[in-house]
Amino acid sequence: MSARRTDSSRGSPDFAAILTWFLPGAGHVYIGRPIFGLVAFALVEGIYFLGLRLSDGRLFEYLEPDLQGPLAGALAPEAGNLGALVWHMKTYAFGPGFPRPWPEHMHLGTWLTAISGMLNACLMVRAHLDARRGARASAGGSSPELQVLAGWLVPGLGHVLQRRVVRGAVIFALLVGLLGLGTFLAQGSNLDRERHFYYWAGQFLIGAPAMLLEALHGHARVTGEIRYVDAGLVMVCLAGLLNVLALLDVYGHAEARLFAPHKEGTDAAGSGAGAAS
Amino acid sequence: MKDLPIHLLLFAVVGLAIVGLNAVFADADDAKALKSLPRRLLWFFAGCGVLAVLMLLVERVFARVG
């Protein structure tokens, strides 16, 4: 995303985005939209702290001792909500160091903290765009961050919302197909954050299909050797990472339409990937 | 080596997803993106083939065991 400012901008777009990264909503307070900022803060942090409560803050106890370090959370989806993640790690750290039963809603709790990170990433996009749009920010219209969020939730949905149905269908088929095949090869062992903490983080980027599979599979025990588990794990993680490319395409297209001069309501020529960089 | 065909098949599936996403990311026009897919696939798998041959060659020359 470029950081150019419009004449009517309300502050530095980059600073607004970085503020939001550390404290959800702070970027909007900075650009003069305190109500939006406070509502966003309550939503994003509310989800994080609900997840924290359900999981008793024990997310990082999933990690093996040799992976427990100050940067352990850097590749977790919670890194999208950096302030909460840092507070989480400072307060709960890696537990007492001996095994104990997990809370009843541990998986749901860790999903919620991860979702909070993703929501805050979309909020950062919104803060950056609002700072660039300036006075036009509160005028409504297209919401690139919601299209990106839809594309995360269901791969290809962001494209469908932009009326790029063929593209959306191709992306959905490729990525969800890859997720399904990988899960089949790994016999569902990929659907467990405790077992594969970082592969799970990649897989999380494919959104609802991964959530649905995890809920259906129910974290079954692994009772024997799984022959193609490595191939399966790589596939599901790759599916999530490729969805990031799809999300950038969604954002680039939306951004090009939003800032195309006097072309509101029309399809901006040459939009798409190039506009995202 | 008995699993080689299965691994090649799995690699082909992964390659299809990578190239497919690359095609739609690189081209804003859906029809052009889909049309360019066979050419992109050819380049991708040919490139991977060359890389595999080179790595095997390097392994034989510099890291041969026994």
Image (cartoon, coloured by chain):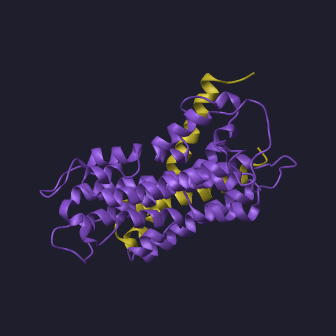
Chain colours: A purple, B yellow
Residue occupying the point 35% across, 49% down: A26
Q: Residue A181 sits in which quadrant?
A: bottom right
Q: Is residue A103 left or right of residue B34?
A: right
Outermost residue toward the left in this view: A7
Residue B60 placed where, x, y %?
64, 28
Residue A86 placed where, x, y %?
50, 37
Residue occupying the point 26% across, 68% down: A257
Between residue B13 and residue A126, name the one nearer to us. Answer: A126
Quadrant including the N terminus of chain B? top right
Residue A108 placed where, x, y %?
66, 56
Residue A235 in sight: no
Residue occupying the point 53% across, 43% down: B50
Exactly how many numbered labels are in the figure?
Answer: 0
Residue A16 in sight: yes
Between residue B23 and residue A24, name the one nearer to us. Answer: A24
Quadrant including the C terminus of chain B? top right
Residue B55 placed where, x, y %?
58, 35
Q: Is residue A186 left or right of residue A237?
A: right
Outermost residue toward the right in this view: A223
Between residue A88 and residue A169, name the one nearer to us. Answer: A88
Q: Residue A254 sits in which quadrant?
A: bottom left
Between residue B52 and residue A238, name the one nearer to us. Answer: A238
